[in-house]
């Protein structure tokens, strides 16, 4: 039987999410998974962390050091995950076979783990499984747990739901995640080496002004000169209120026309989002009609 731990490195869950936690635990137990968690470190009466940053990190460190734990699923999101990264035990994380799953604000932690250990993590919110909105999502998730042809299946689903805007092929190690949260690492020792990497970017909120600000900062950091390709996931608010085509036009203003550029709305904040392995190689090719 596999064993997993549920944690919250970012803002604590609200108490009205307790029922969905029960549903998630039931789903995982039906997959023959034993679930560990500390309720007092998951839920918060405020919109900040359930416990302080050092304690949140210590809980995660303990799980990474526990050889019985196969995966750590972070259930949180928000703003404050980056205050925990200086307290994480990267030596323990590197030596552990355990893998972290998280999304949104956990972009900071996932990329810090890669920059400090070279270890991959999964950009995915397991709470979304409770909605059962996508068989493809569930199959991709369970394949990652079984680790049998997982990379091949996840890549296949991403391939089938992607469109090349520039270029015709893309191969390399993927880094990134939520664009706002990824940029929190800029100027710190946790910023990963992006040379010849594929950068994945998505966003929940943000219209033209905010997205331009993020892209300009990435341009000024010379990121678009370093990377070998760019994948745009869903930009939820922008896509719905302004449109995907205009988003792509804006991105083109900041990037080289020879840079391979891929668009996929299958990965992001939406409840049927596919998982994406950060810190592992991905290969995509333009589909022939």
Image: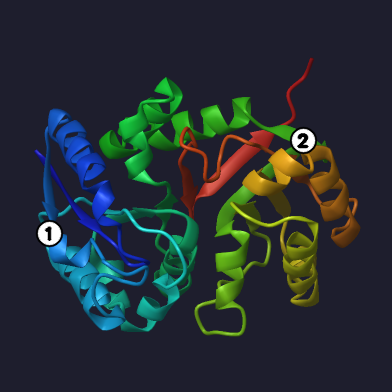
Identify whether 15 is placed above or below 186.
Answer: above
Q: Give percent across and percent down for residue 186.
A: 61, 78
Q: Residue at point 52% right, 84% down?
A: 189
Q: Residue at x 61, y 39 (%)?
A: 283
Compared with 79, 55 (above or below) is below
Which residue: 74% across, 38% down? 169
221 sits left or right of 20 in the view: right
Q: Nearer the viewer, mark 2 or mark 1?
A: 2
Q: Quadrant of residue 215?
A: bottom right
Mark 2 lies on residue? 164
Q: Secondary structure at mark 2?
A: strand
Q: Position of residue 229 (x, y in %)?
A: 72, 52
Disc 2 packing (10 Å; few <14; some 14–19; many ≥20): some
Residue 205 percent location from the top left of the image = 62, 55
Does residue 178 appear to the left or right of 209 in the view shown? left
User: Residue 198, image x and y in percent?
Assistant: 65, 54
Which callout, 2 or 1, points at the residue further toward the start of the chain? 1
Q: Quadrant of the C terminus?
A: top right
Where, by quadrant of the figure, is residue 68 drawn?
bottom left
Q: Pick whichever, 270 or 66, lies toward us.
A: 270
Looking at the rendered structure, the secondary structure element under dot 1 is loop
Q: Is residue 131 above or below residue 232?
A: above
Residue beneath the point at 34% across and 38% down? 144
Q: Which mark is residue 32?
A: none
Quadrant where the N terminus is found in the figure: top left
Kindly identify which numbered label has been placed on residue 67.
Answer: 1
Tell me how many marks there are: 2
Which of the 4 image quadrants contains residue 92? bottom left
Q: Is residue 28 visible?
A: yes
117 in relation to 131, above or below? below
């Amino acid at each position: 039987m596999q064993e997993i731990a549920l944690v919250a490195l970012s803002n604590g869950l609200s108490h009205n999410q307790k029922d969905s936690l029960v549903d998630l635990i039931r789903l995982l137990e039906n997959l023959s998974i034993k679930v560990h968690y500390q309720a007092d470190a998951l839920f918060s009466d405020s919109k900040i962390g359930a416990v302080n940053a050092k304690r949140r990190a210590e809980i995660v460190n303990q799980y990474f050091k526990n050889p019985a734990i196969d995966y750590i699923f972070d259930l949180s999101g928000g703003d404050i995950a980056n205050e925990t990264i200086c307290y994480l035990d990267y030596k323990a994380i590197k030596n552990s076979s355990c893998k972290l799953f998280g999304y949104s604000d956990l972009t900071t932690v996932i990329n810090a783990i890669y920059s400090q250990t070279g270890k991959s993590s999964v950009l995915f919110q397991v709470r979304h499984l409770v909605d059962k909105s996508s068989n493809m999502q569930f199959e991709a998730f369970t394949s990652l747990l079984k680790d049998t042809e997982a990379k091949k299946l996840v890549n296949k689903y991403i391939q089938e739901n992607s469109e090349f805007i520039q270029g015709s092929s893309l191969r390399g190690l993927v880094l990134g995640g939520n664009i706002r949260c990824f940029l929190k690492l800029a100027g710190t020792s946790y910023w990963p080496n992006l040379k010849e990497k594929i950068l994945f970017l998505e966003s929940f909120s943000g219209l033209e002004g905010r997205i331009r600000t993020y892209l300009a900062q990435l341009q000024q950091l010379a990121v678009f000169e370093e990377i070998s390709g760019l994948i745009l996931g869903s930009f939820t608010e922008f896509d719905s209120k302004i449109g995907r085509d205009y988003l792509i036009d804006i991105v083109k203003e900041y990037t080289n026309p020879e840079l391979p550029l891929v668009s996929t709305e299958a990965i992001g904040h939406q409840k049927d989002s596919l998982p994406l392995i950060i810190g592992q190689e991905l290969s995509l090719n333009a589909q022939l009609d």
